[in-house]
Image: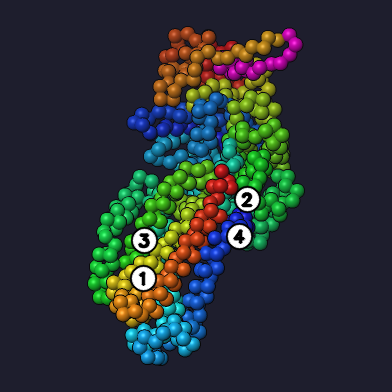
Amino acid sequence: MTGTAWQRLRDNGPGIAGLCIVLVFALVAVCAWSGLLGQGWAQVTGGRWESAGPDHWFGTNLLGQDILARTLQGAANAIETGLIVTVFSIFLGAALGALSGWSGRGWPDELVLWIAGVLDSIPFYLFAAAVAYALQGHEWSMHVAMIVTFWTTTARIVRGEVMRIKSREFVEAARAMGLNGFTIVLRHVLPNTLHILVVQATITFVAAIKTEVILSFLGLGVKDGVSWGLMLAESSQEVLAGHFGNFLAASISLFLLLMGFNLLADALQDALDTGKVIR
Amino acid sequence: MKPVLEVRELSVRANSSGVRHRLVDNVSFSISAGQATGLVGESGCGKTITALAIMGLLKEPAFTVTAAAIELNGRDISRLGGRQQRALLGRDIAMVFQQPGTALDPVFTLGQQITRVILRHRNETRKQARQTMLQALGKVGFADAEAFAAAYPHELSGGMRQLAMIAMATVCRPAVVLADEPTTALDPGATALILQQLKRLQADHGTAVLLISHDLAVIRKNCRDAMIMYCGRILEANGAGALFARPRHPYTAGLLACIPRIGPRRPAVVDAIGGQVPAMTDLPSGCHFAPRCERADPTCSRAAPPPEALGGGTVACYRPL
């Protein structure tokens, strides 16, 4: 099936375009992490508000820092945040959703639904501010706020899917082979939700990057680093003065990455929907 | 010869919808090594429930299972539970399901699924398990076992899936295989193939097979003994030959009369049993078949007729034929 899923993805033009964009950003992130790109983001390397030129391709900002370096480092930060938030919230959502769906009408289901309901009812930015305050502006407060609120959607979807799968005959057959409940969930039920988890992961990743930018813009996100959100915050003054470097670099990068990811997510959804093949 | 599986006084109650009604009522039977026993009955009469109850797969609170004993090779498995029960399933007693399309996990290859069962029950390395898996697939008739091991269930036909299911159920050489309508979803060619495999199991490994079916012809041709089930009770049990040649219970006789016979001088009319199968929530008292039975008299509705020896088998009827 992986073979055919890849073939379906390969035939999807926009999907491939999205994949290429995402791969380019991933490459940038890897290079930035390994110290090959965007290292001078904090250094003053030029005059204030220099326009684009051979020394500074995207120009410099108020302090004379290179905007290209800051954009690349911002990309690495955005992707890092996206990955961390996605991995944890998908893992949490899958685990709690499976627990909830598998236990049926029992108390674990009630509890998980109640927690999810409570978390969903809190306005997100208020919650992020509260977490940032509670963690005293710790650099992970943004991640914690996102993980704690983002898992609920995945959990709800997984819960429904697990309830559907639970009554399928292969689960009964797995029982008849002597597997216990935990093993059945791990080996038979969750693998059958994989297509949902992959698509949810792409959606969560996009949401996390967007949220990182917004939170950083609001001063609730990245503190001691660089972020597209911080660049946009700087540019809110600069644009009025006629300096578009920060604004264009951050917003175009954000747009490209999100669009690339959305295209890929759409294509993945089509390619991985086993329902179209099997049933 | 000591039976491999002996079921004594098995009852199953469903606890749903407020009413605790009996799906299986005081069923006793035994099956011996190397032979097939048929369990015949209409849809919803409790055949599958009987098999699931023997496997211990019906759990409280939805079901209440009671039995005097379910002995597998002389060991009572009716009061096991949890880990001990699961250790038996798939190793000593296995089940083949009616719908091979849905009984196999769609996201894993056949090889992965069969290997998993081997690793669960046998002390083998992955490499050995793979060899065992390929042998099992070869044994049920897949000439190119490697290719089938790499196939996903949706890539195979129904018959092939059922063969794979049989390979999976029998890979650990269980003493008993409960085959729950294994051929119902299949075409005649595939049916023949599956039945042939079940026969091979009996001959090669001395496996005892409980063949559940509503197809009288399948039972007659493939089983040494046969039991007729109606509304959760076994009405008649006998050697398959004797049972079909000389039915003693009016219901058995009615079932046999339902088989259309094609011949030059026979009328093309099927004798149907009058009336309808009663709802399990509203069973008539006494003999459940009495309201539809031409031979019934008032005694039939008073108490359930106990199984009595007659003509080499047993019949639960006050007024047998």
Identify the residue under disc 2. Answer: B152
Same chain shared by disc 3 and disc 1: yes
x, y percentage for residue B167? Answer: 65, 46
Instruction: Point out the tag, 3 or 1, that comes first from the N-terminus.
Output: 3
Queried whether the magenta region covers residue B257, the answer comes back as yes
Instruction: Point out the tag, 3 or 4, that comes first from the N-terminus.
Output: 4
Queried whether the magenta region covers residue A238, the answer comes back as no
Q: Is residue A41 visible?
A: no
Identify the residue under disc 4. Answer: A10
Q: CA distance from mark 1 to mark 4?
A: 31 Å
| Kind of residue at disc 1 | Val
Q: Residue at x 43, y 60 (%)?
A: A203
Numbered disc 1: secondary structure: helix
Instruction: Quadrant for the N terminus of chain A, please.
Output: bottom right
Same chain shared by disc 3 and disc 4: yes
**Mark 3 — on which chain does it sit?**
A
Number of marks in picture:
4
Q: CA distance from mark 3 to mark 2?
A: 34 Å
Q: Are marks 1 and 4 in contact (CB under 8 Å)?
A: no
Q: Nearer the viewer, mark 4 or mark 2?
A: 4
State which region is magenta. Answer: B250-265
Which numbered circle lies on residue A150? 3
x, y percentage for residue B284? Answer: 42, 18
Q: Residues within 10 Å of mark 3 (few under 14, many from 20)?
A: many
Instruction: Point out the tag, 1 or 4, that comes first from the N-terminus.
Output: 4
Same chain shared by disc 3 and disc 2: no
Front one among B34 and B101 = B101
Q: CA distance from mark 4 to mark 2?
A: 21 Å
| Kind of residue at disc 3 | Phe
